[in-house]
Image (tube, rainbow, N blue to C red):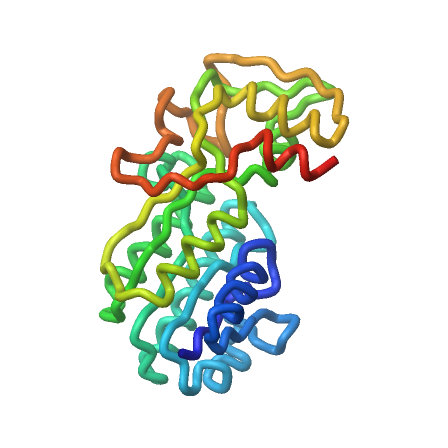
Amino acid sequence: MKVVVIGGTGLIGSQVVARLGEHGHEAVPASPNTGVNTMTGEGLAEVLRGASVVVDVSNSPSFADDAVKEFFRTSTSNLLKAEAEAGVGHHVALSVVGTDRLQASGYFQAKQAQEDMIRDSGIPYSIVHATQFFEFAKSLADSATEGDTVTVAPIKIQPIFSGDVAATVGRTAVGAPVNGTVEVAGPDVFRLEDFIRKGLAVRDDTRTVVTDPNGLYWGAALQESDLLPGADARIAETRFDEWAAGQR
């Protein structure tokens, strides 16, 4: 089948395209780099012609509240409209475990709005909720750094390898729409401070990581288990230490 992957040249999208191609599907990467812009609508009608499935793994270039809200609102609106006109039968979107619990953050407000638009669109859909990626430990640290100190809340996290996320997204894309949410997480639960320490160590980053009960996560105050998946989540196989060993 023809599967168009919005954000198909990024970390997750490029892996989804490769995996689908290996299984004989026509996987088409779509991004501004390939002449497709969901913010303006440029190239959408052409790339969606004949598509059975659209996978949206795109992300906002800015995490500023107003910018990220505008990105997901406009991009998703344009994409869903073009899909309806093209007769696309399955919309798959990548989102985040705990989105509904993180609504103090502008970013997660935007992701929730995206999900609501998908549910209300009338197009059969599947939303994949993934936990934080191994690769993003540094980004988490950067968002909570002052000087040489990273201050994080005393919470738990169950991070996942990006390749395992891509595999789940790909399997979801070629399956029947669930008209609901699929959760996927890594095999191990960490304290957030321990995960960030491990992630920084992979990069020989010597910043000090400390905990603070008042620490925020992308601007949101969290309960200890807010970032953890539910009991029915799919658990990926790749462990953090295995992934880290391959980065050195």
- What is the quadrant of the C terminus in the image? top right
The image quadrant of residue 55 is bottom left
Instruction: Name the residue: 75% across, 20% down.
Output: 206
**Measured along the vertical axis of the image, is residue 154 above or below residue 200?**
above
Q: Is residue 219 left or right of residue 248?
A: left
**Residue at 41%, 65% in the rendered image:** 76
Say which quadrant the N terminus sits in: bottom left
Q: Number of marks in the image?
A: 0
**Residue 161, x across and y down, in percent:** 53, 42
Residue depicted at 48% across the width and 34% down the height: 159
Q: Is residue 149 left or right of residue 132?
A: right
Image location of residue 120, percent across then percent down: 24, 63
Q: Is residue 104 left or right of residue 199?
A: left
Q: Position of residue 210 (x, y in %)?
A: 60, 13
| Location of residue 194 in the rendering, given as x and y in whole percent from the top left corner | 56, 19
The residue located at (31%, 70%) in the rendering is 90
Q: Nearer the viewer, residue 142 or 234?
A: 234
Q: Quadrant of residue 231?
A: top left
The residue closer to the viewer here, 51 or 147, is 51
Q: Is residue 148 above or below residue 172?
A: above
